[in-house]
Image: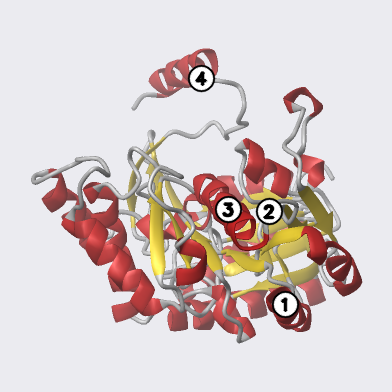
Amino acid sequence: MKRSDVEQKLGTARTCLFPNYRPYPLIFERGDGCRVWDSEGREYVDFVAGIATCNLGHCHPAVTEAIRRQAANLLHVSNWYYNTPQIDLARRLTELTSMDRVFFCNSGAEAAEAAIKVARKTAFEEHGSGKNTVISLKGAFHGRTMKALTATDPKHHIEAFSPYPEGFVHIEAGDIQGLRDHLPDACAFFMEPIQGEGGVRPVDPGFVKEAADLCRANNVLLMMDEVQTGVGRCGVLFAYELFGIKPDIITLAKGLGNGFPIGAVLASEQAASHLGPGSHGSTFGGNPLACSAALATINTVVEQDLPHRAGKMGRILSEGLEDLVQSEPAALEVRGTGLLIGLELNIKAAPVVQQLIQRGYLTTVVQEHTLRFTPPLTVTEEDIHGLIDALRDTLLSRGGSS
């Protein structure tokens, strides 16, 4: 595409799309594995992967073929009926987790909404009214629909969206006493194993284990948000496995469909049994096309042992970033697990991201001073070393203005 055509397209986008995003002036046309190409043919190594979504890389042949085959057979029938990919994906997810049942939707925020409804209905039917508070963590991010947003850290709350739903409280990660104080009125404790949007901050395992015990003792459901951490990204298939616990509910999306929109709530039999006919639904949830893409994704992740690969590549990435911390004053701290890694800087991260784009590497910013790296689980050691070299050169120039 000519530069003049690109500028025209960008102008149309700025005019016709809602202004709720701040996208970089790039129009991507093609992807393959860990690489994408823009409308002018420039190549980029992708350490974003659709924000921890394309875990197999772009246009993985197994997922592409599953979508192609299913699109030729059946796209949608609604949940008045079953469909084979839906059944097969539900069975596979229950086989691979400690959960008993699955509800399908279209996104992580929808999964959070459904999980909250399950928790409140379970508490109401088992303990009566009043035990309906959802406890979540400061620094959390669970989505942008109203209940998911209210469970999210309050700094994301916008006054113009108020009034927010009632029945949500936030505690600091690690604050066991704060958790104890709220448990008598709580139906659920909702948390991410690693706070992605909160700055790539792993939650302390000791806190998680003690919280799980307290929840069980107080008839409070433990809900793990695995939207960003799940499907192999953290070196295990699902990050809750790192803590040696069994949640009551897990929310999934992002990497589950390798870029095809799908969300899911996995739950114990006890919790799932309370969401009876008519209590919740989703027109497109569990449609054959999304479930075919997700089934191909999860099977490939398991068959190719990509969680193990994510752990190995994550260690290489972390070691390279740790070297930068030792040698570059702008780099302060490395955080994360597997291929969900953050680098804290003492300068603003956005100019660093912009310079990395110029050098052919895509990364993201969280919490103003943190670079986040979420490449496909198929990323190579060569790609990682290339990123580290580009980042070192960028930090030497201080990433533009600080």
Quarter placement of the C terminus: top right
Q: Quadrant of residue 301?
A: bottom left
Alpha-carbon neighbours of circle 3 within 10 Å: few (<14), some, or many (≥20)?
many
Q: Establish if 240 lies above or below 21.
A: below
- The residue shown at (76%, 77%) is 214
**Which residue matches tag 3?**
121
Q: Which residue is mark 2?
A: 197
Element under disc 2 = loop
Front: mark 2 or 1: 1
What number is the disc on residue 17? 4
Where is residue 6 shown, x and y percent of the image? 42, 23
Distance between mark 1 and mark 4 Cα atoms:
41 Å
Residue 359 screen position, x and y as percent? 56, 51
Depth check, front residue: 376 or 135: 135
Q: Is residue 237 left or right of residue 294?
A: right
Q: Which tag is nearer the camera, tag 3 or tag 1? A: 3
The residue labelled by disc 1 is 208
What amino acid does circle 3 point to?
Answer: Lys
Looking at the image, tell me whether mark 2 or mark 4 is earlier in sequence order.
Answer: 4
What SS does tag 3 mark? helix
Question: How far is disc 2 from disc 1 in space, using C-alphas?
Answer: 19 Å
At label 1, counting other C-alpha atoms closer than 10 Å, the crowd grade (few under 14, some 14-19, many 20 or more) is: many
Q: Nearer the viewer, mark 3 or mark 2?
A: 3
